[in-house]
Amino acid sequence: MSSASTVPETAPIGVFDSGIGGLTVVRALHTRLPNESIIYFGDTARVPYGTKSAETIVRFAMQDADFLRNRGVKLIVVACHSASSVALPEIVRHFDIPVLGVIEPGARALVAATQNNRVAVIGTRATISSAAYEKAIKALRPDIEILAKPTPLFVPLAEEGWLDGDIAEMVTRRYLSGFIHEGIDALLLGCTHFPLLVPVVNRVLGPSIHLVDSSEETAARAAELLQTRGLLNMQGPARHRYYLSDLTPHFETVGARFLGAPIGEVIRVSIGGAG
Amino acid sequence: MSSASTVPETAPIGVFDSGIGGLTVVRALHTRLPNESIIYFGDTARVPYGTKSAETIVRFAMQDADFLRNRGVKLIVVACHSASSVALPEIVRHFDIPVLGVIEPGARALVAATQNNRVAVIGTRATISSAAYEKAIKALRPDIEILAKPTPLFVPLAEEGWLDGDIAEMVTRRYLSGFIHEGIDALLLGCTHFPLLVPVVNRVLGPSIHLVDSSEETAARAAELLQTRGLLNMQGPARHRYYLSDLTPHFETVGARFLGAPIGEVIRVSIGGAG
């Protein structure tokens, strides 16, 4: 453990995810904090974390955070819902720099958005099974009613780029139309893949249901946190580095879709038993 | 390396897959060879293999095969398309018992099924990118015309159990209807998840396109191989064991759907960096 006081504000922000979904958080960070350098680590050799046991996820997440810490980051953003659900306390305990997950910022924004105290959360099967969002939301406002539903087909829809059209709409309708009848007024998109589906979800649910995008909220919270701690990089220039534990031909296409821009150089790195 | 001659015909058949899709091969083996005991290993801690590099897949597949060999199996069935595509030669070279992949049996059946020498293959993105089926088919009949297409949404459709209905039909139509106009007369389902979608695929493609199910063909080839080598278990009783490198709550439901029957006892096992 090195001392946090040695990390200058020009140091990069570290972001890790089990795969490439976390690039939607990076995209939101770029927009909000254009001066900040970002180091991204995607554990593509061991993706997905969601189907693995809590014990395994904690072990992998600690290795990921360690990789970033060793590159001198000033903040670790855990842009993976599974890791945020189960490994965040352990990461916070172990490292001497600020650590931010994707669960709490989304939960906070959802609570702020609802007027009738009836909300819903969607995510992968693993995220929903963990009930991490329910716990985070209840901790903020115990009297809220929360519906939670896994929407696993949203992941390959986002990866295929089938973001609009009949199939995206029918899958969205099948998963979400029950929420309209339930009278929710806010829906949390609890997966880093889901920001790409915002237009179709909006179309199906209509304007009276407020969408909360966890990637967007996490970037907002990161900005707030750096400001509070006097760690904002006011001068730039931003320089980004992307590391993956495995490279696949498919990565560039899908990664660019998630990042909203072409990805520059990507470096393969072996960590733990991953590479 | 132990000698093959020491393996009795009462020894179990070993089957491994990156996850639980291989249970469709086990199901086909149960039907065809009811006297045979089966040891299944699903590397659920490292699933999927398809998104990983060839080097990583070979390393994982060798560990999986080793696990089965150490349990005294008489035959190793590589029920994982990614591992069959890239790791089969290495496994065959290393072990002294028969080894069977899922690619060659499917390719052989496809070549036997076509009359007009125009066929198609579907699978995960990784399987299709590997061109493993094209190579296997061309090796059998060089003059054949092969269309190949990744159909990634079929995997979560099978796992969700959305096997029929509008969404399954529209996804199937979007992926496959072009094949009708192309005039193919045989389609290979090159993924262990896909047998569950046979009814909807049949409905979309109509009776004039013959479906070849790689799980079914692999079981048929295993029966043939054991018979030829005098390794058929004529007496039983069959006793099955299921090992996974990680246990998830979701496994039992989806596993039973793939196996076509409830799964009995499942044992978690750590191999390589998996557990």
Image (cartoon, coloured by chain):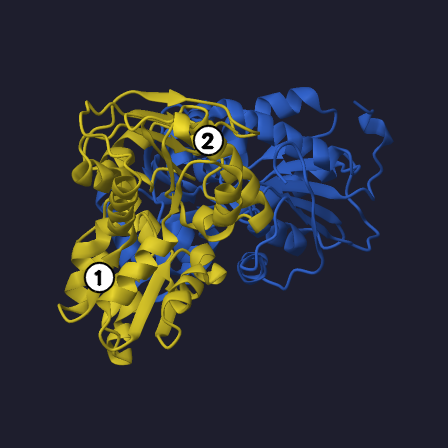
Chain colours: A yellow, B blue
Please tell me which residue is depicted at 50% across the width and 42% down the height of the picture: A91
Residue B141 x, y percent position in the rendering: 43, 26
Amino acid type of the residue that numbered disc 1 sits on in the rendered structure:
Leu
Instruction: Name the residue that disc number 1 marks.
Output: A211
Foreground pick, A241 / B184: A241
Foreground pick, B40 / A139: A139
Residue B254 position (above or below residue B112): below
Instruction: Name the residue that disc number 2 marks.
Output: B52
Q: Secondary structure at mark 1?
A: strand
Residue B139 position (above or below residue A86): above
Q: Quadrant of residue A72?
A: top left
A202 left or right of A142 in image: left
Amino acid type of the residue that numbered disc 2 sits on in the rendered structure:
Lys
Q: Residues within 10 Å of mark 1 (few under 14, many from 20)?
A: many
Please tell me which residue is depicted at 69% across the width and 21% down the height of the picture: B94
> Is residue B165 visible in the rendered structure shown here?
yes
B47 left or right of A32 in image: right
Dot 2: chain letter = B
Q: Secondary structure at mark 2?
A: loop
> Is residue B208 visible in the rendered structure shown here?
no
Please tell me which residue is depicted at 46% across the width and 46% down the height of the picture: A83
Residue A79 x, y percent position in the rendering: 37, 43
Q: Quadrant of residue B34?
A: bottom right
Residue A244 position (above or below residue B31): above
